[in-house]
Image (cartoon, rainbow, N blue to C red):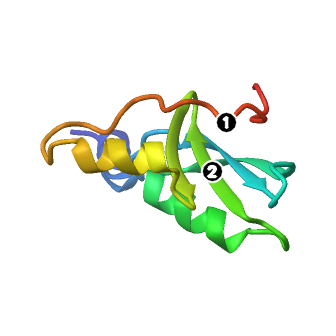
Amino acid sequence: MTMVDLTLQRAQASAPKLSEPSASYDICYVDGTGRLIANHCVPCSSDKKACILAHAMRPQGTRRIEVWRGPCLVYERPQTTRAATLEALRPVYAPAPSNLAAWPGRAKG
């Protein structure tokens, strides 16, 4: 093995592994009248991190927060009766519903 081969082998071993690309989340903030206050599109590595970020960036006057990953509603507060019912009826082993009814004022992207 030559010195060049050893150098390349060491460089490949120490190179950082590329992780999967982050998913893009739409975070919507709605006031008490149902008007969209703000909408942010952010990359996050997980649903949980997107929800934490949504609460951290909440603007003044927000009464509702929604976090969307594509067409899927990932998180909402306060939780609607329909979403709470679906969550309560879902068996523990079953995956979460892929698409809840979209809020009519949500920006189409």
Disc 1 marks which amino acid?
A: Trp
Badge 1: few (under 14), some or many (20 or more) residues near its Cα, within 10 Å?
few
Check the picture and name the quadrant holding the N terminus: top left
Taking depth in this image into account, of 97 and 23 the one nearest to the observer is 97
Whether residue 77 sits left or right of residue 39 in the image: it is left
Q: Mark 1 points at which residue?
A: 103
Question: Foreground residue, 66 or 8?
Answer: 66
Q: Which of marks 2 and 1 is in front?
A: 1
Q: In the displayed structure, does residue 102 sit left or right of residue 45?
A: right
Q: Residue at x 84, y 54 (%)?
A: 33
Q: Is residue 71 above or below residue 64?
A: above
Q: How many labels does the image show?
A: 2
Instruction: List the residue tagged with mark 2.
Output: 66
Which element carries disc 2, helix, strand or loop? strand
1 shown above or below 56? above
Q: How crowded is mark 2: few (under 14 residues within 10 Å), some or many (20 or more)?
A: many
x and y, in percent, of residue 106 in the image: 74, 35
- Where does residue 20 sit, x and y in percent of width and height? 43, 40
- Identify the image quadrant of residue 104: top right
Q: Which of 1 and 25 is in front in this view?
A: 25
At a point 67% along the width and 36% down the height, the residue shown is: 103
User: In this rendering, would 44 be left or right of 35?
Assistant: left
- The picture places residue 63, in percent across and down from the top left corner, at 73, 65
Q: Looking at the figure, which quarter contains the C terminus? A: top right
Give yes or no for contact between labels 2 and 1 (Cβ–Cβ under 8 Å): yes
Who comes first in sequence, dot 2 or dot 1? 2
**Can residue 108 be seen by looking at this rendering?**
yes
Tell me which amino acid carries mark 2.
Answer: Glu
Q: In the picture provided, is 5 more to the left or to the right than 63?
A: left
